Image: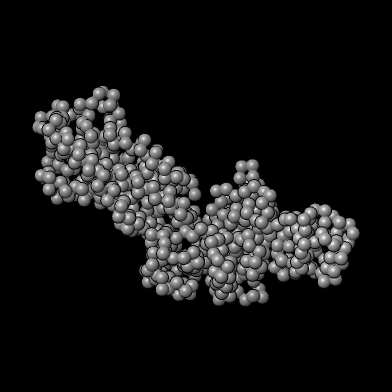
Amino acid sequence: MVVCEQVVADHREPKPRACRADIVTVRGLTHRYAENLALSDVDLAVEEASLFALLGPNGCGKTTLFKILTTMLRPTAGGATVAGVDVVTQRAAVRRRIGIVFQHPSLDDKLTVRENLVHQGNLYGLFGKPLATRIDELLSRFGVASRTNDFVEKLSGGLKRRVELAKSLLHRPGVLILDEPSTGLDPGARLELIAQLRELRDSDGVTCLMTTHLMDEADRCDCVGLMDRGRLVALDTPSALKATIGGDVLTVDTLDPRALAADITFRLAAVAEAVDGAVRIECSRGHEFLPTLIEMFPGRIQSVKIGKPTLEDVFLHATGHSLAGTTQPEAEVN
Amino acid sequence: MNAEATPSSFLLPAASLWRREILRFVRARSRVIGALATPFVFWILIGSGLRDSFRIPGATASVNYLEYALPGTMVLIVLFTAVFATISVIEDRKAGFLQAVIASPVRRSAIAMGKIFGCSTLATAQALIFLLLAPLLGIPLSATATLLSAGVLLLVSVGLSALGLLGAWYMDSTQGFHAIMNLVLFPLWLLSGAFFPPSGAASWIGWIMSVNPMTYGVAALRHAMYPDGRDWGPGVPSFGLSIVITILFAVAMTALATNAVKRRE
């Protein structure tokens, strides 16, 4: 069983930050489900040993992209490589090099934590003492060592997610691909998950690529790709993305957002839009703009919120609708 | 996929999937009881009810119906256990377990084999437990007979497990699986010579029985249980032919099921 060692040794060495190469590349990726265009000419690259988030509402195509990158789906056109290997022509090789965390845990409830991990190790050609050692190492790393012999059905959602993460890392993949990994987690457990991914990035040089529809989660990643209706609409670090908006964002609650937005645009020469039942204004100097706004429209403003732009604002700016956008039909089917 | 296929991408994963199947089964007591008790009750009730009113047309010696129905009951156990064990693949898909297996570099044939042999091991073991009850009821059983019977039961189980997997792989609901499988399985078993001999049936029934692969499984088991020979009446196929057809059925079903696993991910 010399082969197993080879698998384990692949893509482990973290490269120095200064000369990191792209470990995932996507070129002209397009996918169609019958009539539905789920992905349209997507190009992107993910740097080695970084945290990358694909942020977008349900049906934006991020799960389709996840499926293509994990070799579960063949694209209609275009291609992608993961760890230097083509996801269409060298599927087995890609599968050895990636770890996958699914949206719904892939653990067997009727088996213990250890039995689940031993089984997963076996699938990747690992067995015996080296596997047992690796399991112990990962379980203590994620703080579930005390639950090793418990049945998975007895674990909470947060603990299951940690076991799932350990499961995906058994064969020491260089790239971890996660589909909405925070599904079913409370906010505390979500923060913890991101911290664990960062730790993997820093200590093991693992690249993490995850899909999410939560802006605060994407905000904690090194790089974010914004997706909408099958297209990649923006791609950069969270701070660079937010800097494209600049200044401040004012959100005004009012009874008639459309009319107020039109009036503000007309009388104050500002960019005001009616979004999700409120008026949203981007301006460079919010604190100066605010008093003018309130004096000019007495009685029409119920409340005003002023803040620095978020990824949600970047998304709105790029697409004209919010992340929670329900305007499009669910395009991702199995 | 074959470029990087290694020995460890078949045997180890297949064995691991097999082991999981066994673990899950023994942990679910109700499944063990259901698969054993149902055919037992069935056998005792029907067998005792028909005990003295049964006679094989064309046979020289008379056969107690309990004895006549025993091999068929064991095939029924195999049928229930093997086919319904393969339902687990539908649950595995729903619960998410299967997605990790499918996304792993494991060969598709290993996934099929792990499931088929897992389910057939369970089925064979259950039928053997039942077989060991036979001496208690005055039916003689030698070591040769037991070994031969175990072999035949395993062959029959492999064919039926593969048939079950073939059906379950494409289905998304266990209810649908039950409906379809009852439609296919019950006639398959009823017309296998397990329940009534071909010699006394209407000629069109006899014709169906002769093309039913289960007929050969039941016949093979009859021969295996009585290595010294026993008169089961005319129309029961020979041991050799029965074994050949049973093997062919197992191989064909396994090939079809493996192909199904390769085609749908």
- The residue that appears at 57% across and 50% down in the rendered structure is A74
Q: Position of residue B142 (x, y in %)?
A: 12, 48
The one nearer the camera, B61 or A145, is A145
Image coloring type: one colour
Q: Where is residue A334 in the image (x, y as percent from the top left)?
A: 55, 48
- The residue that appears at 47% across and 74% down in the rendered structure is A143
Choose top left, top right, bottom left or bottom right for residue A133.
bottom left
* Left or right: where B247 falls relative to A81: left
Choose top left, top right, bottom left or bottom right for residue A103.
bottom right
Q: Position of residue B35 (x, y in %)?
A: 28, 47
Residue B230 in sight from this viewpoint: yes
Choose top left, top right, bottom left or bottom right for residue A309.
bottom right
Residue B256 in sight from this viewpoint: no
* Left or right: where A328 falls relative to A280: left
- The residue that appears at 62% across and 48% down in the rendered structure is A331
- The residue that appears at 41% across and 70% down in the rendered structure is A147
* Left or right: where A274 falls relative to A227: right
Numbered label tally: 0
Q: In the figure, B5 relative to A173: above or below? A: above
Residue at the limit of the structure toward the top, as seen here: B203
Q: In the figure, B222 relative to A108: above or below? A: above
The one nearer the camera, B58 or A114, is A114
The one nearer the camera, B43 or A13, is B43
Q: Where is residue A106 in the image (x, y as percent from the top left)?
A: 47, 59
Residue at the limit of the structure toward the front, as seen here: A299
* Left or right: where B190 falls relative to A318: left
